[in-house]
Image (cartoon, helix red, strand yellow):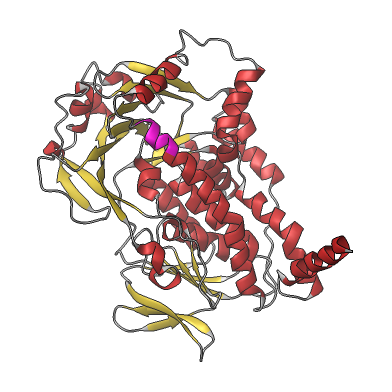
Amino acid sequence: MHPINSLHEYMQSMKLSSKRPSLLIDFIIVGGGVAGLASAFALAKSGHRVQVLEKTHGLHQRSGGIRVPPNLTKILLEWGLHEELAAALTCRKSQFHSFHSGEVIGFLEWQEDIIQEAGAEFLLMHYDDLHQALYRLAISAGATVTFGTSIRSVYFDDTKEQPVVVLEDGTELSAEVIIGADGYRSVVRKTVAPEADVGVDTKHSFYTVTVPTSEMRKDPELRQYAELSEWPIWMGDSRSALGYPIRDGKEYSLHVYWPDEGLHQSEPVEEGWDVTVPTSIIDFEEYDPRIQRLFNLAPTALRTRFIRREIAEDWLDESGRILLIGEAAHPLLAINCFQPCTMQGPSLAVEDAAVLGVLMSRLSTREQIPQLLEAFHDVRHERCIQVHTTELRNAMLVTLPPGEDREMRDAGMRLSLPAVETNWDDTKLREQWDEIGEVFGYNAREAAEDWWVKWGSLGSTAGYPVHEPLDLIFEVTKVAVSE
């Protein structure tokens, strides 16, 4: 039996029945990417009325794979996507190569005990397959998705006492809650957190190609990568690469992180997913020749400029009715998707949706809306900071320049080679779990339910807005201590 099928049976056996809120409201979600569609499903499945506005004219075909770590796999299984995940490739291993020589420097293998503790498998799949699966979920739950709809702005209408979306043609749409899931170039963020909209150009870009593995098998040195369910990483000076098979091993996704300086073409101007460039743009002459041959199996690559933006401090506007999620709130998707050693961009977006769905399934009065949305920020903000810190540290690790730090890194990694490290005792397992446990072992649904048990139910049963009972208890405690 495929490990995903057995995991699905386990998830189904422990699945809680969906809670239906006593108050059902209207949501408008701006953006039909992973965050938007996942949130549409999570809200609609409990009965809320959800409309998604997407500016593209259909499901966007983004040519590239993604890694699905256990914290994401768990949610997708709970949502019933076991068939889609069964078609993905299970991955436990990765080799670390020198970008210059191709030498194997290190080896990573997640042990069975670690995967069991994390609660789900680590998978490799195509971005489009995940995107389309979430679309089907959202539609089946009752959400509506309107394509070809760009927005100009959002604001809170004091007269209607509702937030409003202004479309490009001037049409205005209102709902009880507007959610900005419109990515790292978010229009909604300009209203909620304009200070977070300023980015820093890193002078680097990401390049993504997807090639048929049938072509790779014609090259004796590339054949091994087409046939192994692993993701090799090449580490270089301010550059790196990562590859892995997808779609039942029929395709191979390669991501390259490269400086803009010295390209065989002018530097990229647009920040977006849709910039197509010839693969000849990068000169790999001084590097592992396998990368050059693999990259050039595709005539063109998708190029994405890496603009670094900070996580927004505020995800909720002053009215408490306009919320940021996904990349719009914590916009580091490019580095999280495609930079070697990072993987959590889509995971954080779906975690956002899972938490939001649980919290809004407890809605009983309109007065609760801003409190529950603020609770979403409370549950998610620190988690996103923690994951981004870990991801950026890993990204820096694989792009170190020559010097003492890189020598120390390589020496440490060589100790992980199978010929060196053969026995895994409890201490080594604990060390590996300590490195990834907080990230992989996280359960978004449980985090939201824990918040509700500790704090939310106090507010709802007492008949107060969610946070007021906490202030009262705190003040009484202070008086008691001071006496």
User: Would residue 184 be visible to someone looking at this image?
Assistant: yes
Going by the image, does 315 lie left or right of 132?
right
Q: Residue furthest bottom?
A: 159
Residue plotted at (43% across, 63% down) = 181
Q: Is residue 59 above or below residue 158?
A: above
Q: Residue at x 52, y 50 (%)?
A: 384
Give residue 23's position: percent from left, percent from top: 66, 75
Side of 204 relative to 464 (left or right): left
Residue 211 in the image: above or below residue 13: above
Using the image, determine if residue 344 lies above or below residue 248.
Answer: below
Magenta stretch encompasses residue 404: no
Q: Is residue 396 magenta?
A: yes
Q: Position of residue 263 (x, y in %)?
A: 13, 40
Question: Furthest-top residue in view?
Answer: 419
Tell me if I can see residue 128 in this picture: no
Q: Quadrant of residue 194?
A: bottom left
* Label total for image: 0
Horizontal relation, residue 380 to residue 403: left or right: right
Rendering coords of residue 251 (x, y %): 31, 34
The quadrant of the image that shows the C terminus is bottom right
Q: Quadrant of residue 67?
A: top left
Residue reaching furthest to the front? 483
In the picture, which quadrant includes the N terminus? top right
Query: In the rendered structure, which segment of residues is drawn in magenta?
Result: 393-398
